[in-house]
Amino acid sequence: MKKVKITVMRKACYPDLMDRYEKPMEHACDMCEGQTFVADGWEKPIGLCDSAWQSMSPFVMTLAHGGSHIYGDWMKNPHSAMISCNDGFRPVSFYLETIEADFE
């Protein structure tokens, strides 16, 4: 298996939707643009949001097991994927890329 680097690329925020539908929350998302994590297979990296991990873990596992061209040719790097978490109020985009070094 290969390690997969996870980079926080962008955070969006929809205050109009939050005002209309969401109960006020503190620390709903603590991800920061440029923040990186490394996944060892199926294990969620420490500090990565649980909800984000649920959205991306199938893609991480595919890449960790040598998969490529997820959803055809939509990525310039065939061993990568751009995935967003499932938070409809403040979605975060994550870039997943295989780290070439194998691990045990």
Image (cartoon, helix red, strand yellow):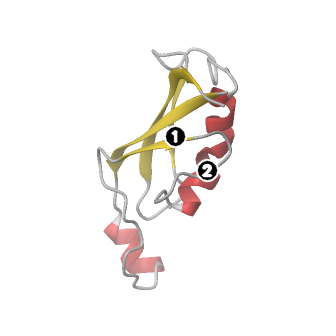
Q: Point out the residue furthest to the bottom here.
A: 23
Q: How many numbered discs?
A: 2
Quadrant (top left/top right/bottom left/bottom right) for the N terminus: top right
51 up-or-down from 59: above or below: below
User: For the point 70% across and 26% down, which residue is it?
Assistant: 65
Closer to us: 67 or 87: 67
* Label of residue 55 in the image: 2
x, y percentage for residue 43?
Answer: 64, 49
Position in image of residue 27 (x %, y %): 37, 75
Residue ID at (65%, 39%): 41
Q: Of helix, strand and loop, which one carries label 1?
A: strand
Q: Is residue 103 above or below residue 41?
A: above
Q: Earlier in the sequence, mark 2 or mark 1?
A: 2
**Location of residue 15 by image quarter:** bottom left
Find out whether the residues at labels 2 and 1 contact each other: C-beta distance under 8 Å.
yes
Which amino acid, mark 1?
A: Ile
Residue 74 versus residue 40 in the image, above or below: above
Vertically, is 67 above or below 62? above
> To which residue does mark 1 refer?
83
Which residue is nearer to you in this view: 69 or 12? Answer: 69
Where residue 61 sits: x, y (%)? 68, 36
Q: Position of residue 98 (x, y in %)?
A: 53, 25
Quadrant position of the C terminus in the picture: top right
Q: Specify the farthest residue to the front.
A: 104
Q: Is residue 65 left or right of residue 56?
A: right
Element carrying mark 2: helix
